Image (cartoon, rainbow, N blue to C red):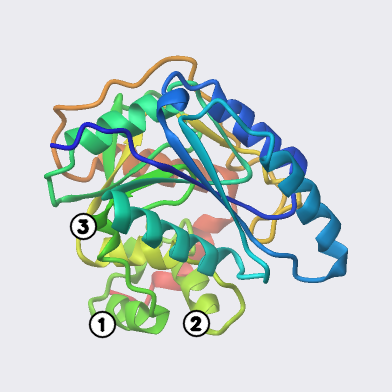
Amino acid sequence: MQNSLAPITLFVYNRPIHTKRTVEALQKNSLATESDLFIYSDGPKDEVDKEKVNSVREYLRTINGFKSVKIVERTKNWGLAKSIISGVTEIVNKYGRVIALEDDLVTSPYFLQYINEALTFYENDNRVISVHGYNYPVVGILPETFFLRGADCWGWATWKRGWDLFETDGKKLLTELESRNLMRQFDLDGTYSFSGMLKRQIAGLNNSWAVRWHASAFLVDKLTLYPGKSLVENIGQDKSGTHISSGKIYKANISENPVTVGNIPIEENKGARQAIIEYLLSQHPGIIEKIKELFKNRS
């Protein structure tokens, strides 16, 4: 079993304030000084973004507090999906495991500890495809850790064996979801339209790598480990990002305590899944009748 810490990949673009908050939180992790940090800085789309991208890069060159810091500056704009897919692939193929963060994710001081412990504990269990740091602010108390089917994207990690299952062809993924009659389950019983996001990706209306990662894992019945209390907060819900709008639906208070990893059933936790469904329903009271209407003719 591999004992070295997983390298961290951080994907940044044109948000210097968000990037600084993300890095500063990461530096407060006890394992930061033992972790290698790889930063992928995407190139500007146009002259308007160029100044902000340069501002981010000036800050990146001042970063310390890690075992090593390597910065990859793209000369052209790759876009988030290509940047993440390429960067994660490069690092996981070299090191066998990888931690992935974007420039608007503030982490708990215990984030790296949890992620690395889970990567080691489940390294040889092929039922587990990834580890995730964020969790919804659900009502009630969830287990210390639990599994959900699929994969996720706000502060996560995986192994090469997991990332090798990533299917980039959205149309292929959608076809299989439909043919196996899995659309409603994929959409958390209709409370979150992952399928709609996937359809928009296929149509070129978004460039989401995350929904394809989730679908890839979901279709091969793989599980992702979650903490009962979130170790990640997304601070990008201020209309500053490309792929997320404003709103407080996903705002989670970061846990002030470490998370204990290990010795839970390797299966989807139905109670945790239902708690998330109920939380999403509570944020959209009118959705219940819409869901009933949408699925009344489906079996």
Task: Identify the residue under disc 1.
Answer: 179
Q: Position of residue 142 (x, y in %)?
A: 34, 27
As shown in the figure, which amino acid type bears the numbered disc 1?
Ser
- SS at circle 3: helix
Q: Are marks 1 and 3 in contact (CB under 8 Å)?
A: no
Q: Quadrant of residue 63?
A: top right
Specify few, some or many for label 2: CA neighbours under 10 Å numbering under 14, 14-19, or 20 or more: some
Q: Are marks 1 and 2 in contact (CB under 8 Å)?
A: no
* Residue nearer the viewer, 72 or 255: 72
Q: Position of residue 87 (x, y in %)?
A: 46, 59
Depth-wise, is mark 1 or mark 3 nearer the camera?
A: 3
As shown in the figure, which amino acid type bears the numbered disc 3?
Arg
Please determine whether, in this image, residue 41 is positioned above or below residue 208: above
What whole-number distance in Å separates the C-alpha atoms at marks 2 and 3?
A: 26 Å
Task: Identify the residue under disc 2.
Answer: 202
As shown in the figure, which amino acid type bears the numbered disc 2?
Ile
Specify few, some or many for label 3: CA neighbours under 10 Å numbering under 14, 14-19, or 20 or more: some
Task: Identify the residue under disc 3.
Answer: 161
Residue at image point 21% right, 34% down: 120
One can see residue 150 in this view: no
Q: Quadrant of residue 18?
A: top right
Q: Position of residue 204 (x, y in %)?
A: 58, 82
What whole-number distance in Å separates the C-alpha atoms at marks 1 and 3?
A: 26 Å
Q: Quadrant of residue 299?
A: bottom left
* Residue nearer the viewer, 206 or 19: 19
- SS at circle 1: helix
Mark 1 / mark 3, whichever is N-terminal: 3
Viewed as shown, does residue 8 lie left or right of 51?
left
Please determine whether, in this image, residue 177 is positioned above or below residue 70: below
Q: Which mark is residue 171?
A: none
